[in-house]
Amino acid sequence: MTQGAAYNESDFSKIAFSELEKSNIKYDISGSELLAYQLNDLSRLAHNKENFSDFPIILFKNDDFIIQALHWYEASTSIHDHRFDGAFKVLKGSSIETTYDFNTSDDSSNRTQSGTLVKRRIRHLQVGDTCEINGGNRYIHSLFHIESPSITLIIRTHSKDSYPAQRDYHAPSLSSECFYQRAEANKLAGIINSDAGRLFSFDKEFYHQLFDNIEKFQIIRLIPMLVKKNDNLIKEVLINKYGEHEAAEIAKVTELTHCRRQLNFLRKGITDYESRLVIAVMINSSTRVETVQLLTEVLPNAVFEDEISKVVEYMVKHRWVPITIEGDSIADIITAAVSATTIDEYFSLLVEDFGAEAVDTGRAMLEKAWHQLTTNKTISMLWELK
């Protein structure tokens, strides 16, 4: 890709997309091959100041653009835009990509803005697929990587001052400058979770001072840690500061963000490809119809209840759900809970599996298990498939 006399940087995304589309690239490349290339010249590693992806390898760089092999080991990117133009092509692995629009009347330069996050498209990206990147809010997306690592080849400009700072977006209604809020919130989280934080008295005055001195999305990132200390007090202070409507908005964004983060973390421990796809689809779908439609496309032969049961069983095994039943019967109990739409149907299925006498003997314990499974917020999205 050369820069000719007719070159116009505004066409860069289209040029990069075209070059990647027609390129004859080796698709069976391994992460170890690229890592060997990087380690063959340690000076490349020393001068690699890029922080985009979990491990970016620079293949070419000049004053106009950069070519990188991006390695993704984490399951999911945030919902984000970009401060550059370009295109990327999937070399290894696959992912669920969701694209969005963000509609806002807030034209201020605030690090946090309110608006409406609108989903445009969900698709399954696989090896050979190419996507165009347009800077700013013209291309807002998230990627949930199924394999680890996934590798993408990207051709892009350097960060451009003509675009605003890169932003993260938080369903259903907020956006924020991503690198600022992550750094500051992580500092505060470290303090709160330290030995000193555990001994500190988190009273109303503390929360008033804290919320007066940090921006809205720092609050959202910290609430999942703080609610363990005093949930009701936090709600009271938020209403005093923002009013009931805005406090409710913060609560909704917090819940969705926390569930997304928990399911993303869950993926790291699951090696089953189909289960990872289920988690990816659930994170990025907002309705049952949307979920079933996409799962039918990516897993045409799957039995949804079986796939959900595998995910929930993993969560129970690793104490994500505080269920009080032990032993070999737990898998059958989870399957019954996933398959049933009411508690009566759940018990009917258990009678088929274990017999009426055994179910009557353990009824109190089994009823408690039903409530523990069906009220867990982290897996509530999984129940939408029923």
Image: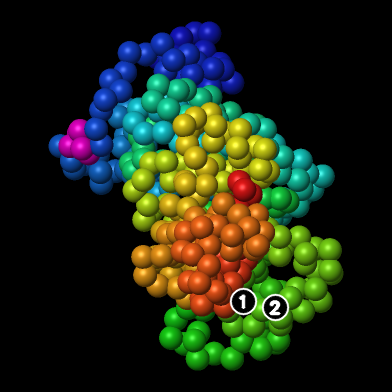
Q: Which residues are magenta?
A: 32-37
Residue holding disc 2: 234
Q: Position of residue 259 (x, y in %)?
A: 57, 58
> Is residue 203 visible in this depiction of the protein?
yes
Looking at this view, is 248 or 343 the one in front?
Answer: 343
Residue pushed farthest top? Answer: 5
Horizontal placement of 344 versus 354: left or right?
Answer: right
Q: Position of residue 237 (x, y in %)?
A: 75, 78
Q: Which mark is residue 227?
A: 1
Q: Which image quarter is the N terminus in? A: top left
Which quadrant of the figure has residue 10? top right
Q: Which residue is at a point 71% across and 82% down the rendered structure image?
A: 233
Q: Earlier in the sequence, mark 2 or mark 1?
A: 1
Q: Which residue is at a point 49% across and 86% down the rendered structure image?
A: 198
Question: Which residue type does callout 1 highlight?
Answer: Val
Residue pushed farthest left? Answer: 40
